[in-house]
Image (cartoon, rainbow, N blue to C red):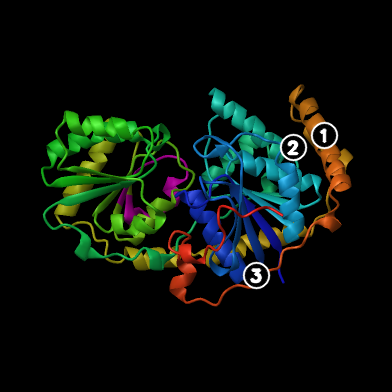
Amino acid sequence: MGYRIAMVSDFFFPQPGGIESHIFQLSQRLIDLGHKVIVITHAYKDRVGVRYLTNGLTAYYVPLHTVYRETTFPSFFYFFPIFRNIIIREQIEIVHGHGSLSFLCHDAILHGRTMGLKTCFTDHSLFGFADAGSIITNKLLKFTMSDIDHVICVSHTCRENTVLRAVLNPQKVSVIPNALVPENFKPDPSKASEDYLTIVVISRLYYNKGIDLLIAVIPRICAEFHKVRFVIAGDGPKAIDLEQMREKYMLQDRVEMLGSVRHDQVRDVMVRGHIYLHPSLTEAFGTVLVEAASCGLYVISTKVGGVPEVLPSHMTRFARPEEDDLVRTLSNAISDYLNNKIKTVKFHDEVKKMYSWIDVAERTEKVYESICAEPNLRLINRLKLYYGCGQWAGKLFCILITLDYLVMMLLHWIWPASDIDLAVDRPPVSLSMQDEIETPELKRSSSTGSSSDKFC
């Protein structure tokens, strides 16, 4: 039997997204390599309790309140009793958190270190250094990462950003990119219209995803090319602005808005297009770009973050994150596509060779091996690390760590580990390839838990 790992994040299925897909696919491949993996996340509406997903993956949906974009409010000690119960129940050795904005992840890493577990963190995002939100996030990251065993970033740009934000030793930070299941993103030219050149956009409709930029670009492209239309999938606060733009320029027949789509529907949307447009203002990696290229779409993206590292030059073109340059780049790509200067037939086979979840899982496994070979720090040494986080913050962090130890000792006295029933390990199910690559949305029948499940 391999390692026993708990993936912890606020972001998991049934919510669609890159982090959610990353956690699920990485967990599946680690199970294939012989490890025990569980997922700890917060409840999504009526999805509360224990759920059993594909290939022996167990998901704990903890009843916690969310405050913004499906992130929980920092609970610190409130979450500790449930977390300790799950960890002891499943005999977890490694806590692997995901997402800088996931407070559940930060809480789990803090409590995991207090319990003497190995901890790992994967950063999927880029943040600045000047605005109030980034300053608070960076200070929280510095707190959590002060005693982390190892950090994984999804691109080299993300690694540089995380090292600076959390003041980390670069030797403790590795780069392991995202991947995709190529069988889920096969091209189908018959689905694309022959009468129009279709530009696909799949994104959460938020400011940081460049939706304001998209709103400015669409009318200009539609005015220049009468045989171009847009298909936009996603939901968010900027949806109303897109609707207003469509009404203002009377583009109802040329701009189709699909709303939120599940991850298993992404491929069906992509194969309808010829070009994929990605106007994001910040991006650590951009898994959707790999998915689009695998579906045979030519990619136009803003040159931000780790995006230039994702695809080779013949699959994509970059523009500065500004209206005029994005319009110019997109116009040139449309003209080349209409004149048959862009060939996408071999994109799927090329992407299939570049990105593999098995490779990601094997590289992550090596990280686990390295951190498990290192001894744990004593409490006094941990406090020294936290004390160096700032004149006032350092003292506050030391108080929190000390309180966390006291809470753990209290929990050991009130509810001894010997009184907690151990969970029976569910062996991986022997599945066909199609079953192995299905997401929880497709495998609802394998989810045997219900909203009445309890943590026991």
Q: Is residue 3 visible?
A: yes
Q: Residues within 10 Å of mark 2 (few under 14, many from 20)?
A: some
Question: Which of the 4 image quadrants contains residue 108?
Answer: top right
Which of the two residues, 295 or 114, is positioned nearer the viewer here?
114
Residue sitting at x 58%, y 61%:
27
Which residues lie in the magenta part?
A: 299-316
* Magenta run includes residue 405: no
Residue 168 is left or right of residue 272, and the answer is right
Q: Position of residue 132 (x, y in %)?
A: 56, 23
State the residue position of label 1. Answer: 403
Which of the two labelled residues, at mark 3 and mark 1, occupies the earlier sequence position? 1
Q: Amino acid at mark 1?
A: Leu
State the residue position of label 3. Answer: 426
- Give the position of the C terminus as an image quadrant: bottom right
**Alpha-carbon distance for marks 3 and 2?**
30 Å
Which numbered mark, 3 or 1, is in the foreground of this view? 3
Which numbered mark, 1 or 2, is in the foreground of this view? 2
Residue sitting at x 61%, y 27%:
136
Q: Residues within 10 Å of mark 1 (few under 14, many from 20)?
A: few
Which of the two labelled residues, at mark 1 and mark 2, occupies the earlier sequence position? 2
Question: Which of the 4 image quadrants contains residue 236?
Answer: top left
State the residue position of label 2. Answer: 77
**Alpha-carbon distance for marks 3 and 1?**
35 Å
Q: Secondary structure at mark 3?
A: loop
Tag 1 and tag 2, C-beta contact below 8 Å: yes
Q: Position of residue 67 (x, y in %)?
A: 54, 33
